[in-house]
């Protein structure tokens, strides 16, 4: 499919998604409040349709659209399908919660789909401008979703913090990109890499640009010392929005990092510069994230600091600077999204109208209230802690092996020690679920699709832990062909 010489077939899933969300906005205008489940159903249908179109248009060859601004390769195909599944899981988990808090509105679903569209554009960007446009589309949608509860001062404060710090990060990122453009004379990602490798880039200006780019990336993924927004936004946002922020965007962020650092700035002349910066970010993130999480009594804040620590582990794979390292980072991102969905999904499941299951005490005696949910949460927490044979263990092992092979042995030892520290606050929740008396005896109400998704989510953590090889191989092959 071409228009005026532009090959639109690689971007067909994004075109479908844009048309569908526009139609949902119009349809929602004519729906009464009691029929709002139609918007929910259409949104899930859109995500399923987008995933089907993505698989149908996937091919073994890399294809470009819009005169090289947009790329469709194996890495983008794999990550986009994961994003569709993650966002669909978020919406299923959030259905009861959103209805009880008057969030079951067209704006909630439209913003979630526009954020998904931004993630899609980020993942397939082959040009600095496309990267930035996708990032801003995703970010602005998430800022608005955090502020959807207009009568909540906490949500409004979280949205303001997220917006101000996000705008600062975007400015730093854009400034860094402009410096790289000044040093190389190109905004095309592949061409930037070629010019740096050919020695046609101005060294000092390129290094300055790289510093700003890494700082901007650090803000977006919540790495220390650019993490200050993460706990407040995770805590202040409605839990239905928190689970979205903490899951699918991590996949888009990984693609963002790989396109910028591995593809554009992966030449031997400059790779050592950003590797040293990422090593510092990874160490600080693992240290502060794991240590500070111990002191948290709010599970959303605990999981926020856990996210910071996990982003440190993800950076271990990236800083290795090898195809195996990039593949292990992609594997880690996919596994982390699966675990994060399950953890926040359980928080949503235990919440009800007039009650937020935000505190660790709310998980007391969960095994007495529902043994199945307690078992699923046990699997997810063990995986987050990196306990064999859960898939989280293999994800950590993969990035640690990649970093060790690249010579970062001291950092790997530190990562193992911080992982042991992190196991404490995960096992503390397990202790509350199984060895403490239940304080809340209210029945846990969930829809059939919520129960099904939670079961699949929890059991997938165990199943992938028993057979992780195929997913790791898929990630490594996708990265090897694409970068």
Image (spheres, rainbow, N blue to C red):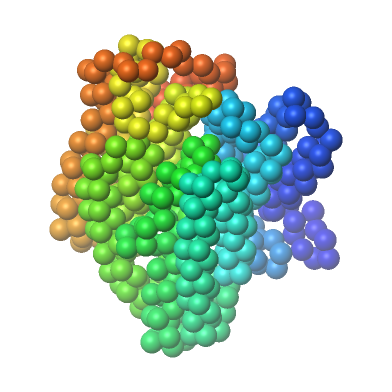
Residue 46 coordinates in the image, percent (x, y): 70, 37
Picture layout, residue 85 above or below residue 135: above
Residue drawn at point x = 47 percent, y = 72 percent: 172
Picture layout, residue 178 above or below residue 103: below
Horizontal relation, residue 174 to residue 468: left or right: right
Picture layout, residue 187 above or below residue 452: below
Residue 127 coordinates in the image, percent (x, y): 59, 68
* Residue 16 image-quadrant placement: top right
Horizontal relation, residue 184 to residue 413: left or right: right
Residue 236 coordinates in the image, percent (x, y): 46, 45
The reply to whether residue 468 is in sight is: no
Horizontal relation, residue 318 to residue 162: left or right: left
Residue drawn at point x = 50 percent, y = 63 percent: 164
Residue 391 coordinates in the image, percent (x, y): 34, 34
Q: Nearer the viewer, residue 432 or 353?
A: 353
The reply to whether residue 219 is in sight is: yes
Q: Nearer the viewer, residue 87 or 28?
A: 28
Q: Nearer the viewer, residue 359 or 258?
A: 359
Total numbered circles:
0
Residue drawn at point x = 36 percent, y = 43 percent: 301
Q: Nearer the viewer, residue 177 or 66?
A: 177
* Residue 368 image-quadrant placement: top left
Residue drawn at point x = 28 percent, y = 50 percent: 289
Horizontal relation, residue 144 to residue 405: left or right: right
């Amino acid at each position: 499919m071409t228009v005026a010489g532009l090959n639109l077939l690689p971007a067909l899933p994004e075109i479908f998604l844009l048309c569908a969300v526009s139609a949902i906005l119009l349809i929602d205008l004519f729906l009464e409040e009691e029929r709002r489940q139609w918007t929910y159903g259409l949104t899930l249908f859109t995500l399923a349709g987008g995933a089907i179109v993505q698989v149908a248009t996937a091919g073994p060859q890399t294809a470009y659209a819009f005169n090289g601004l947009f790329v469709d390769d194996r890495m983008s195909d794999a990550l986009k399908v994961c994003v569709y599944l993650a966002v669909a899981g978020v919406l299923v988990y959030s259905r009861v919660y959103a209805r009880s808090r008057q969030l079951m509105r067209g704006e909630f679903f439209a913003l979630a789909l526009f954020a998904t569209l931004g993630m899609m554009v980020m993942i397939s960007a082959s040009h600095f401008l496309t990267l930035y446009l996708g990032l801003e589309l995703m970010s602005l949608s998430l800022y608005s979703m955090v502020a959807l509860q207009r009568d909540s001062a906490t949500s409004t404060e979280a949205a303001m913090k997220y917006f101000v710090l996000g705008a600062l990060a975007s400015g730093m990122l854009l400034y860094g990109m402009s410096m790289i453009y000044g040093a190389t004379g190109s905004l095309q990602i592949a061409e930037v890499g070629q010019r740096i490798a050919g020695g046609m880039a101005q060294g000092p200006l390129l290094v300055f640009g790289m510093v700003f780019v890494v700082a901007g990336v650090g803000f977006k993924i919540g790495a220390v010392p650019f993490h200050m927004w993460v706990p407040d936004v995770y805590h202040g946002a409605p839990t239905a929005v928190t689970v979205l922020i903490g899951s699918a965007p991590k996949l888009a962020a990984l693609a963002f990092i790989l396109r910028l650092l591995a593809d554009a700035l992966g030449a031997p002349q400059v790779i050592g510069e950003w590797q040293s910066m990422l090593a510092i970010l990874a160490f600080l993130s693992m240290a502060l994230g794991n240590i500070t999480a111990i002191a948290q009594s709010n599970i959303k804040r605990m999981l926020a600091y856990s996210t910071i620590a996990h982003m440190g582990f993800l950076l271990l794979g990236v800083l290795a600077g090898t195809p195996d390292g990039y593949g292990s980072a992609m594997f880690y991102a996919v596994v982390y999204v699966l675990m994060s969905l399950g953890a926040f999904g359980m928080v949503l499941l235990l919440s009800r109208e007039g009650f937020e299951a935000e505190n660790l005490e709310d998980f007391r005696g969960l095994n007495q209230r529902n043994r199945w949910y307690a078992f699923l949460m046990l699997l997810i927490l063990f995986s987050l802690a990196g306990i064999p044979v859960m898939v989280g263990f293999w994800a950590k092992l993969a990035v640690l092996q990649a970093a060790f092979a690249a010579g970062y042995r001291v950092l790997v030892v530190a990562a193992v020690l911080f992982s042991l520290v992190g196991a404490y606050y995960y096992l503390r929740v397990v202790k509350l679920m199984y060895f403490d008396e239940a304080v809340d005896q209210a029945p846990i109400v969930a829809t059939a699709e919520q129960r099904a998704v939670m079961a699949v989510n929890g059991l997938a953590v165990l199943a992938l832990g028993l057979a992780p090889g195929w997913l790791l191989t898929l990630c490594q092959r996708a990265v090897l062909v694409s970068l």
